[in-house]
Amino acid sequence: MEAHQIEEYFKGLQDQICAALEQEDGVGQFEEDQWKHHSGGGGRTRLIQNGAVIEKGGVNFSGVRGEVHPRLRAQMELPEHEEAHFFATGVSIVMHPHSPRVPIIHMNVRYFELSNGTSWFGGGIDLTPHYVVEEDARWFHTQLKDVCDQHDPVFYPEYKLWADDYFYIKHREETRGVGGIFFDYLKPCAAGEESAVGKHTKDQLFNFVKGVGESFAPIYTTLMRKHRDEAFGEREKQWQYLRRGRYVEFNLVWDRGTKFGLETGGRTESILMSLPPQAQWAYNYLPEEGTPEARTMELLQKGIDWVTHE
């Protein structure tokens, strides 16, 4: 599997997801902003705003190449004198709905390779409900487990745990949402290792990443359809703004991709596409006991086995 083939697949994935979201929303249409990266390559940022369901969302494709940034060189412990170039491509998505009954969702699938022959895949998908609906969380995780199990039964438990740890707001001691799966640095096995336990070829890893990417549209359009017409009032809207504030805190304080992109001269508008149109912060806010808001806070914790959760 060549890099240009992976890049073309991600372009097609962006097209498929945008079409599915537009159809389900019924009003919103994506606007495209094509851009070029200063080191080579570029991308297509697609933004949907003020739809019937989606208030603000982005489906971004990028295919960037150039010389390895000093920060990444240090991270990968590459010798200073060694010439190194990179190619990176992927699709990144965040959806912020109007309704506090419809959850926020994020997905990223990506591929990275170096001129020295090293390559890997990464990505993940996670759900951030404003109000945790346990039935939805169980269904969401079951969908992800089914995708993972088609490729390797160890993927779901391992990557679910990774997501629990990654999407954790440490300074709040709470998870960003109900988690999902997260994986990074999935490197293809070397020649002759195909039969070894836990080893996967490049094609096998790419097929897994495709499975994750193609699960996004049916998962999120189902949740949009289920909750789009449910009633809510000012109380629920204010809670939504507070939960969006937590989302902002995670992305700007803890998210590695956001921090790395800004520190290495990435395209600011595309990187910060993940932020909601409005958010709020309240000093020392604590929901009243016995309320749906308090129940949601109880469920924002690591280690919940959502597949079997009753």
Image (cartoon, helix red, strand yellow):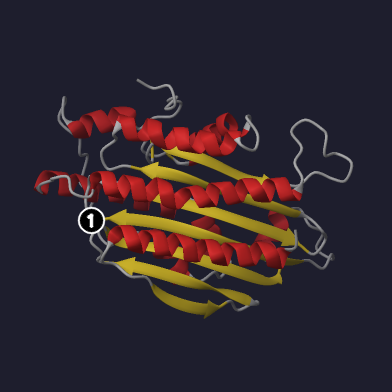
- Give the camera-side residue of 199 and 238: 199
- Give the camera-side residue of 205 and 115: 205
Residue depicted at 77% across the width and 30% down the height: 197
Above or below: residue 14 compared with residue 303: below
> The disc labelled 1 sits on which kind of residue?
His
| Residue 82 rendering spot, x and y as whole percentages | 84, 64
Tell me if 254 is positioned left or right of 156 in this view.
left
| Residue 77 rendering spot, x and y as whole percentages | 76, 53
Residue depicted at 41% across the width and 64% down the height: 19
Image quadrant assignment for residue 155: top right
| Residue 66 rendering spot, x and y as whole percentages | 69, 72
Q: Quadrant of the N terminus?
A: bottom right
Image quadrant assignment for residue 272: bottom left
Q: Secondary structure at mark 1?
A: loop
View extreme (front): residue: 23
| Residue 37 rendering spot, x and y as whole percentages | 58, 76
Residue tagged 1:
98
Residue depicted at 39% across the width and 39% down the height: 171
Tell me if 183 is positioned left or right of 139 in this view.
right
